[in-house]
Amino acid sequence: MKLNAKILLIILPLLVVAIGCTGWFAHSQLSEASLDNSRRQVDAALLDLRSSILATQSNTHSNLDLFAADTLLQRYVLTDEESRYDLLLTALLRLLSSYQKAYPAYFEIRILMPNGFEDVRLSSLDIINTTEYEANSPIFERILAAGELDSSFFEMNPDTDQVAFYFTKPLLVRDNTREAFDAKPTLRAYLSVAVSLQWLQDKMDEASTETGAVLMLTDASGKVFTHSGNTDFIHATEQLHSKLPAAHPSRTMLETLLAGVPVQDFSTINLNGQDGYLWSRPVAESYRLAAWLPARELIKRSSELALFIMLICLASVFVISFVLYVQLNMLIIRPIRHLQRATEAIGRGHLLKKIHIKGNDEVGALAESINAMSSSLQKSHEQVRFLAYHDTLTALPNRLMFYEHLSGAIATAKRTGARFAVLYLDLDHFKRVNDTLGHRAGDQLLSIVAERLAHCMRESDFIARSDGEENHDSSPGILARIGGDEFLLLLQDIPDLLLPGIIAERIVDSISQPIPVDNNECYVSASLGITIYPDDGQSPDLLIKYADIAMYHAKGEGRNNFQYYRDSMNSAMVERANMESKLREAIRDNRLFLLYQPQADLRTGEVIGVEALVRWKDPELGMISPSTFIPFAEENGLIVEIGTWVLEQACKQAVAWLDETDYPIKVAVNVSAVQFAKGNFQEVVRNTLARTGLDPAHLCLEITETSFMEHIDRIDVVLEEIRELGVLIALDDFGKGFSSLNYLRQFPIDILKIDRGFVNELSTTSDTGAIITAIIAMAHALGIKVIAEGVENTQQLECLRERNCDFVQGFYLHVPQDGRKIPPLLVIE
């Protein structure tokens, strides 16, 4: 027996059984789903009709309130019969006619007197009024039953012989000309509106067409007021009970449904000799919306569904058997060999190799899979190439692609003698965005910056994205992101040297505008460096390097600007590199040393503490000012290592003084904002105190306002942990910034150091004295001690003494000196 016959012999019985079971299961599930769907449709239709009736009821009652409040209507019911007919009836009819025009469903508007007399009637239908005196009519009896309350009900209209929806409002009016102001309003008449149920009939017919159910509006007794038009076994004003056999079990179920008892499912009821399902919803007081779905409708649907599924199963067995037989008759070996040859070709790198095998069997599926694999490998190859040459965040070219374009631009410029410019851009303070709003916000900001840069370039400049291969020689320009917040721009064929500056200025202005990020407005600026080919360099490396140098020079000039490259900038960079090298050697070879400037109690003159000041003496350059190397160390991160060393040495020196003199002295150490950025500064302080054995109460950390501003989100936690160790906290250079007052209240500060700028002006400006007085008073009110630094003469000292300053520090008292000279000063002078 052939292989295809064997496979068919195995598969065919399993196929028949599987399809038969599937058909049976599908029929049972679909039958249940059909019943559930019918339930949902009927229930949805009842809820929709109920909502429409309640909405009509609410709107009509609201309109009656408005009609009844009309002055003309109130005057009419207060006027005697003869006068109101002569004077007010015509105007009243016009008013009521306007109401009917606004609400066409109000086919009859009447004013009934308390005795039942129909005083005014306005009908939009051409019908004869057969009942002017309504005292004994069912409608008026329903009105009287409501008393002085608004009423609404369904009742047969005697003039049209059709059920209408009646709304009545008692007109309670006080005659202010004859009755006391606080007299109770008197019932003068009833304002009645009859609403046609044609709209309800239409909605019922529409819902009945969709669901196949008979929809009815009844009262609690089973009286039918209206129904959908798809039945002839029930009519208006008939009772549903009349369609049930006497003593039939369905009668009890019908009474339960009409009584408004909640029922969670269809109820099986025999109406007019037919089995079916009844569903009821209460609406408008004692009325009910009912739906009756004949069982024959569901049986018919189920039978049709079973027949349809059976035909599908038979057709499926036949078609699948035929397809299997045809496919299994084909030779298997040849397609397999074809697949083998194709996969070998793909393995050799021919990724576009396609396998052409027609068929829906496993071999064909395998061929399609190999084709899909080939296409996927080709796409992956293209994606890898794209990722190699583009930035994933902005889809702009990356450094590698920019370098290739720049090399091509240099080759073209050498042939044509053209000039071009390279712009190196770096965002200022971008790290703050990542630190405060998160990296996701930072990525959004970078994408927006990339778009703004694209708009700022000339229209002829080429901004390469993922649109395919580019020809380097024909590309007039390129914008690239080379990492982080750095971008490179290539402007080719510049007519003069001013154009790059114009574009750079355009970029600076654009970037400085607010950038919306996650419902926040971020503000960043840009610093740019510009190099010109061939003036500043003739190789890609030099042009990018010098543009980078010019960019850092722009940052040094205050950021938010651009600078053209000059040879002197390179010299400055060399000097900076030399400075960094020497500073690293000084740290490594212990060439840094500390001097200590005493701090004295202004009342007693006693030296109560010292400030540790780091100094650097280079063998070649001599003494280097802290104002020179400290900012440089903060910029390149060396300040962390220096600050840790200063803290260690100062603590050791304080312990040595205490051992030598047995005199406790407080040592103050300056802390840089960069040290806070590392995130573990409190651990550094804790470990240093543990190693040196210094009492934490003898250590004071001086922190500038810059540290508060740059790390406002976490500095309070760090300071609290340091305070828990027992270390004192001093706010240095107070008054130099613009938010110091808030810091005094918000953070745990023990000592406040008045900036030397205030002290210098103390003897020359009267306003400064007032400011210092206020600062000292405010600090004392908060329990904070005050140190004035930079005291240079007697006049300044006395002014501070008069203002109750606690401590002073300055060259007038003590210059910074070696630690060995401090012990002799630890006496009261």
Image: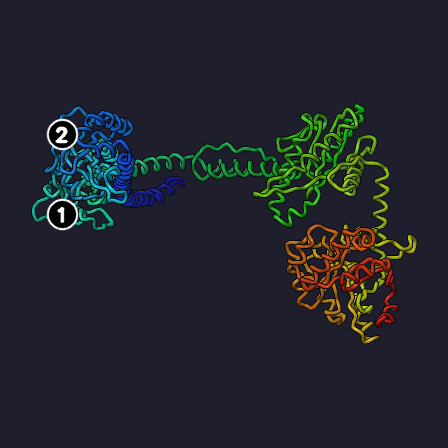
- Between disc 2 and disc 1, the foreground one is 2
| SS at mark 1 in the image | helix
**Residue identifier under label 2:** 159
Describe the colour scheme in one phrase. rainbow
User: Which quadrant: the N terminus?
Assistant: top left
User: Which quadrant: the C terminus?
Assistant: bottom right
Left/right of residue 337 with respect to residue 769 in the rendered view: left
**Residue identifier under label 1:** 250
Q: Nearer the viewer, residue 791 or 386?
A: 791
Q: Position of residue 81 (x, y in %)?
A: 17, 31
Q: Amino acid at mark 2?
A: Asp
Q: Position of residue 663 (x, y in %)?
A: 80, 74
Instruction: Name the outermost residue toward the left.
Output: 246
Nearest to N terminus: mark 2 or mark 1: 2
Where on the picture, by quarter, is residue 471? top right
Is residue 588 in view? no
Residue pictured at 86% horizontal, 68% vertical:
822
Instruction: Please say if 30 is above or below 463.
Output: below
Residue pictured at 64% horizontal, 33% vertical:
465
Q: Position of residue 166 (x, y in %)?
A: 20, 36
Q: What label sits on residue 196 in the rendered view?
A: none
Instruction: Please say if 450 is above or below 788.
Output: above
